[in-house]
Image (tube, rainbow, N blue to C red):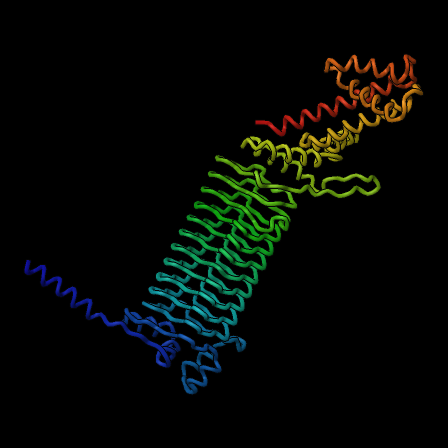
Amino acid sequence: MEQDLELDDLLVIDEESIQVISLGGDELLLLWLKGREAWNEWMSENPNANVHFENVVFSYEALKTRFPDNEDLQNLIKGSVEGNENFCFSSYKFNKYANFKGAQFIGSASFLGTEFEGEANFTGATFTEEVDFSFAIFNGEASFDDVLFESKVNFCRVLFNEYTSFYESTFGQVAYFGDASFNKRALFEATFVGKAYFDFVNFNSEAYFSGSIFNDEADFSHTCLSSSAKFDFATFKNKASFDSATFTGIAYFTDTIFESVTLFTNTTFVSNLIFRPINSEEITSLDFKGAAFEKSFSISGNYECIPDLMQTKTAHHVDLSKLTVKLKRSFVRNYGVEKAVNSSDLERLCRLKEIAESNKNYKRALAFHADEQRASRWIELNIWQSLLDCMYSVTSNYGQSILQPFLWFAFCVAVFAGYASVESNNEMLNNTDKYMLAVELSVSIVTPFISVSKRTREDCMKLLYQGERIRWLTLMSYLHAFFSFIFIFLIGLGLRNRFRI
C-alpha cells in the first residue's frame, strides 16, 4: 500500500514538473529563419512548446525591416528563384499549439510534409500566392476559418486526424484536396472561386458542405464519404461531378443549387439519398447512370432535362411523386413538326416509367409514358404511326385526361346535330326544335347500349324527315358513331387511369 502511494506521488510530481513553453515574436522568427534542422532540434528539446505567429507579416520587406542584418534572412532572400518570395515550413514539426491567426503570407508558402501534433490555427490568415500543404499531418484540430487563399492551394494527401474547419474561407483559384483523409468531422462552408478537386478523398466522419459556393467545376469523383454528407444550400455554378463516389451515410442535397451539368454516374449510396434542389429547372443535365441505391431514394423538382437513371440498381423505395420533367423538342425545318432534341431521352423516360411502375406510382408512370411516346415520335415511329400518336396525344393526352375526350365527344355530337338539323324537311318545326331533336338523334346513335336509344332514334327520324330517306345521312351517322365510340373509350381509359389502385 505504501509503495502504491509513493508511486502516485511520483506521478503527480512528474505531471506538475512538465513546463509548457510559449514562443513568439522576434525570438520565434529568428528560430524559424535558422531552417528546418535547427527548428526540429529545438522542438525535440521542448516537447511542450506552443508557437505563436499571430498577425505576423511574412514578406521580405517586412522581415528586412525587422531584422536588417540577419544573415539567415539574407540567405533566404538570395535563395529565391527569380525574386519570388517563398516562405518554407516544409517538414517542420510543431509539438503543441501552432498559432498562425491573422498571419499574412505575401508570397508563396510551403507546408509540404509538415507535422502538427497539436492544434493548428490559421484563422483569418491570408495567402497571396501559392500555398502547398501536401502530405502534411494534422494530429490536432485544424482551423482554417475565414482564410483567404488568393492563389492555388494544395492539400493533396493531407492527413486530418481531428476536427477540421474551413468555415467562410475563400479559395481564389484552384483548390486541390485529392487523396486527402479527414478522420473526424470536416466543415467546408467556404467559397471556391476556381476549380475544386476533392477526388479520391476519404471523409471518415461527417462532411459538411452546407452553404458552400462552387463558382467553377467541383470534382468529387471516387470520393468516399463514410458518414453523413450534407450539401444542403450549397451552390454549384458549373459542372458538379460525383462520379464513382461512395456515400455510406445519408446524403443530403436539399435546397441545393445546381446551375449546370450534374453527374452521379456509378455512384454508390449505401444509405438514404435526398435530392431536392431549389432550382431544378436550371440543371442542364442530371446523370445517375449506373448508380446503386441500397436504401430509399427521393428526388423532386421541375426539370427542364430528363434525369438519367439507366442501369441503376434500386433495393428500396424510390420516390418520384414530386418529380416532373420536360421533354426538349424543336421544330423540324420545312416539316412543321416537333421532334425530340436528344434521342437518348427516349430510353431515359422508359427507365423512369419502369421505376415509377415498380414503386406503384401509376400517375407518374403514365406521365413518363406520355413523354416517352412524344420522344419516339418522328424518330422510332414512321410518319403514319407518328400522326396516329399525335391524335392520341391531342384527344386524351395519352389516357391521362378525362376532359379532353369528353370535349371531343361533345364536339362530335354538336357537329352531327347541326348537320341533321340542316337536312330536316319538316317545315312545321322551327330551327330550335329541329336542333334539339337533332341532338337527341345524335346522342341516341352513339348510345345503342341504352334501352331507350332505339325508340328515341326512330321518333327523331320521323319528326325530322317525315319518313323520307336523306342522302348522306346514313354515312354521316356511321362516321359520327365511329369517332364517338373512340372518344367514349378514351373517357373510360381516363377514368380507369385516374382511379387505378
Looking at the image, which residue is at 52% across and 56% down?
A: 197
For the C terminus, which image quadrant? top right
Looking at the image, which residue is at 76% across and 35% down?
A: 378
Looking at the image, which residue is at 38% across and 61% down?
A: 137
Q: Position of residue 146 (x, y in %)?
A: 47, 67
Q: Position of residue 366 (x, y in %)?
A: 63, 32
Q: Position of residue 427 (x, y in %)?
A: 94, 20
Looking at the image, which residue is at 30% across and 71% down?
A: 49
Examine the rendered structure and indicate whether residue 166 appears above or below residue 35: above
Q: Position of residue 208 (x, y in %)?
A: 46, 55
**Most foreground residue, 181 or 350:** 350
**Most foreground residue, 449 or 301:** 449
In the picture, residue 19 is in which quadrant?
bottom left
Relative to residue 75, is residue 454 drawn left or right?
A: right
From this viewpoint, which residue is outermost toward the left? Answer: 2
Report the number of discs: 0
**Most foreground residue, 396 or 43:** 396
